[in-house]
Image: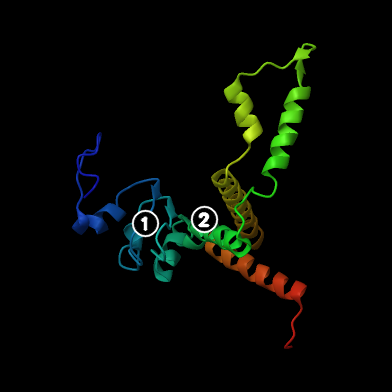
Amino acid sequence: DSLIGFPGATKEYHGSDVRNILELECDILIPAAFQQVVNKSNAENIRARIICEAANGPLTPYAEDILEKKNVLIVPDLLLNAGGVTVSYFEWLKNLTNVRFGRLNRNWEESKQRLLLDSCTYGGKPLQLDEDTMEKIIKGPTEKDIVHSGLEETMIRACAETLETAREKQCSLRLATYVNALNRIQEYYDQAGLLFL
């Protein structure tokens, strides 16, 4: 009920209206709360062109089959929810080393940036920047900036790999995420060597 009275809203929906909301005509549907809300009984009535699974398992396999036949693009929960797991992994890495991100190279980076700025010229004269801009350049990224950067890089790569696999195998994005995950596991075992074969 938190959207009741939202500016520009023309109709109010309540919790009991979930089925009606799912079946509204829209470009993108984002089921984000419950599992299996799109299922065999309502999949045929879904009118969205894209479904982004923000909840865990909001579509049943039956619903997915029906929607794929209707050419609905489904962005699977495994890919869409990967950001939280990725940041948890970064936190785990940080906890293993007991060193915050950026700590080992911050002073070196700041010295390098200061030297670079001091050597910059514009029109044969030293570059004149206000103190705030200089400080932002010299200071470099915070731990939060580093985590966001790593998350962005990881998600961009995962999405690109998923799209490439889906095109190459001519399969759904969900199947492509599974193929990529299994390939990664296989690569790990190949590199690590299997002791018990």
Q: Residues within 10 Å of mark 1 (few under 14, many from 20)?
A: some
Q: Quadrant of residue 168?
A: bottom right
Percent across and percent down for residue 34 are 33, 63
Percent across and percent down for residue 93 are 61, 61
Q: Foreground residue, 7 or 164?
A: 7
Q: Reading the chain from its start, which is encountered first: label 2 or label 1?
A: 1
From the image, tell me which residue sits under label 1. Answer: 32
Percent across and percent down for residue 86 are 55, 58
Percent across and percent down for residue 36 are 35, 67
Q: Secondary structure under badge 1?
A: loop
From the image, tell me which residue sits under label 2. Answer: 83
Amino acid, disc 2: Gly
Q: Secondary structure under badge 2?
A: helix
Amino acid, disc 1: Ala
**Above/below status of 140 relative to 28:** above
Give the CA distance from mark 2 to mark 1.
15 Å
Q: Residues within 10 Å of mark 2 (few under 14, many from 20)?
A: some
**Above/below status of 96 relative to 100:** below
